Image (cartoon, rainbow, N blue to C red):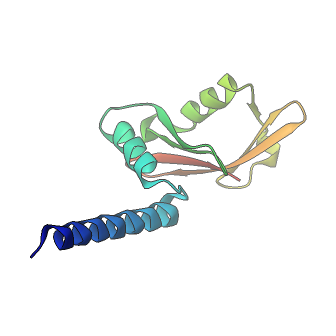
Amino acid sequence: MKKGKVLKIVIVICILIFIITMAFSIYKFGVINPISSGIGMLRVLIADTDYVVVQRFPYRVVFANPEGGQDTLDSYMQERGFEEVEDMRMGSILVYRKGDMIERLNYKVNGYYAMWSWQ
């Protein structure tokens, strides 16, 4: 087999792997960039980081350590100047207010990570 043909096969395999991981990242986490979600997940699971912002646009997605619970989310939002509006909470959808600005986010948690995704 020629070097050019082997190189083309390797490139095609790499592209397919990237497409599959991107589809999984979008399906599972709603994050377009699979590298960002993978590194964020590793930082939460292995490096014991409190939280990692993995996507800012088109909407914010944050991975967090599940042990901190909602207290970590509350402190993160307070750093940004927001306060929780408990009257508007609907199940796992939390509402935070900063003046006239309102942000709604979905709070998911399991044994490995917590995920906060804005709506």
Residue 74 locus on image (x, y percent): 63, 31
Q: Residue furthest right?
A: 100
Q: Say left or right for 80 vs 98.
A: left
The answer to whether 80 is drawn above or below residue 58 in the figure is: above
The answer to whether 96 is drawn above or below residue 37 in the figure is: above
Quarter that holds the N terminus: bottom left
Seen at 43% across and 37% down, the residue is 67
Residue 21 locus on image (x, y percent): 39, 63
Q: Residue furthest bottom?
A: 1
Query: Is residue 77 or residue 15 the one in the foreground?
Result: 15
Q: Say left or right for 110 vs 80.
A: left
Q: Residue furthest left?
A: 1
Seen at 75% across and 30% down, the residue is 82
User: How many marks are shown on the rendered structure?
Assistant: 0
Residue 59 locus on image (x, y percent): 66, 49
Residue 20 locus on image (x, y percent): 38, 69
